[in-house]
Image (cartoon, rainbow, N blue to C red):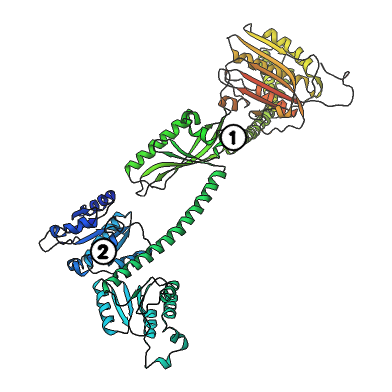
Amino acid sequence: MQKKQNNNKKTFCIVVNDDLKQLNILSGLIEREGMKVRTYQSAEAAIDAFPVDGLPDFIVTDLYMPGIDGWRFCRLLRSPEYAAFNKIPILVVSATFAGDETSRVTADLGANAFLPSPVDGPMFIDTIHAILRDEKPKHLPRVLILESDRSLAALLQKTFESHGYCADIARFGREVCDKFIMLPYDVAVLSYPVSKEPDRDKQISDNIISCNQGNALLERLQEHRPQSVFIMMTTDPRPELALAWMKKGAAAYLRKPFEPEYLIELCANARRERALLRVEDRLEKRTKELREQEARYRFLAENATDVIWVRNMKLELTYLSPSIEKLTGYTVAESMNRPNSKRMTSSSVEMMTKTFMEELTIEEQGDADPARSRSLEIEIIRKEGSNVWCETNVSFIRDEQGKAVGVLGITRDISDRKQFEKERMRLEKQMQRIRKAESLSRMAGAIAHKFNNQLMAVMGNLELALNNIPKDWLWQKNVADAMQAAHSAAEIGSLMLGYLGQLPAKREPLDLSQVCLKALSPLTASMPESVQLITDIPSIGPIVDADISQFRQILANLVINAWEAIGEEHGRIEVRISVVDTSDICCTSIFPADWKPKKKSYACLEVSDTGCGMDSETENNLFDPFFSTKFTGRGLGLAFVLGVLRVHDGALTVKSEPGGGSVFRVFFPILSLKTNLTSKLKL
């Protein structure tokens, strides 16, 4: 509610602050409420303008200013010399005090309210409206005067009250103790020697009697309320008294007689000094805490494995923790001087810049969570040239007004996590292949079982019909053709059983090189002239335990698949025989997916081509029954290869990309026998 003068003029305010920025902020907040404001950068200027401006409705002042500071300014406004201003509300704004100190400082100054700087805008306006509704100071400092001389006590009481104090009088030591326990006095002015209480001295305990001595009384009161200010008055000129009182904690002492105004000034200075000492103690404690905190943070920053960095709003680095050297190989100095394009890959720089611009747009909208953060995965370039995947969490650094002034980031090496994710994806892909293979096997098994059972009945009946039909009968040829088709269908059933690994195999020791060389001769004869066959096959070995006809069929299927991939273009097929260690077998694209090596080394048949290659989808379906990229009806050749390898505890890997050809590598366990194999080898 805005306060109005009787003449319906706007509420008038005076703001005093030597900091021009603070002065403009405070006056701007008040003017926004529709009030009239006069601003001054010193208390002297404000006092000089009082006759011209007239009485304000309230005053806002800082404490620490050159010349007449806020302390003296408030005391002047509460003094008899400026009686017209005694009841005008005063709001003090200062960055020095906080917490429980503010109410005491407010009372000391005779002000109505106190706000810490920088001010919160809504709270500042609410406080102004509150003090306009109640012009009396909410807190008055309390003083207790111990003086047996009634006239002097009354004079001091009147003087204190005229300067905004609530003053009480005590004549005896016991009375002082009682009142000090009951009320929170800010100041105690004690006269020495302390007058005895005639009628009650006999009833006072030894402890209370000791309080009649000035230093003992001072000590007792200070134990009860150490935050109070104690001032001693005396006619005794001995310096040792003053020294003893100061040792006990007295703020000052006075020689009688003295001017009451001098006591007021001395009391104000002592209270101000006590307040500043308490502030200094608190600041010293806080500074110590901050230094310890800084040391902890510095230790953490310098020893953390994560990289902590700070950038300005131009995305220029301003701080970088020493852990950057462990991550990238560059020292802090080297890293600070490198441009963003040298620190990260181009895609990472683009992503970070895009994210920063998005966040700036959100900032301009003004309704975003100031504590929000973003997480990015970027690639950082190491000194030796490799890249490392890192996760970076970024958030804005804000000033006291909440404005974004920089970017704080924490970067962590996630290479292990990336590798784990890669391995997890590989295992998931492998599990999908295993489940798919199990599903296809169940389906193929059921089809083969039904198919063969029905085919057996067809072939049996056809056989009986052929035996009973005369050779010159008109339909004899039709029945013979049907019998031939049934035999062809039986071969398909056999291939399906082969895919399931249920085909019987006559396994025997084979010299893989010799068998391969002999099997390639008829294949070469039927190969298109545009396709060149290159072999890299040793003259002897390796020796494997396998079915020779099934191995020849594997070789034929792979070679035919290779020249069909080349098509009518000119191309090359390479066939190699070698021995490989288990560690050299790639597990990324391996079939069957659940194959686990049981030997230290394996015989390897490699068939590569320069054909059209395959994409990942084709590769995943490559060994499915009846899958083909050629024409309908093809597709059991490679499925048969996989079934044969199941029977022989072998495996096959595929490496291919569109337009880059394909490489098939078939692995058979090497036979290990103690007897001489020369006479037993099948060539």
Q: Amino acid at mark 1?
A: Lys
| The N terminus: image quadrant | bottom left
Task: Name the side, left or right, on which 460 lies relative to 316.
Answer: right
Q: Is residue 652 above or below residue 414?
A: above
Q: Is residue 2 above or below residue 504?
A: below
Q: Amino acid at mark 2?
A: Cys
Q: In this rendering, would 598 be left or right of 110?
A: right
SS class, disc 1: helix
Q: Nearer the viewer, residue 457 or 208?
A: 208
Circles 1 and 2: CB distance less than 8 Å? no
The residue wearing badge 1 is 422
Q: Residues within 10 Å of mark 1 (few under 14, many from 20)?
A: few
The one nearer the camera, 191 or 128, is 191
Q: Quadrant of the C terminus?
A: top right
Mark 2: which secondary structure? helix
Residue identified by numbered label 2: 74
Which corner quadrant of the image does residue 673 belong to?
Answer: top right
Q: Position of residue 30 (x, y in %)?
A: 22, 54
Q: Quadrant of residue 56?
A: bottom left
Q: Residue furthest left?
A: 7
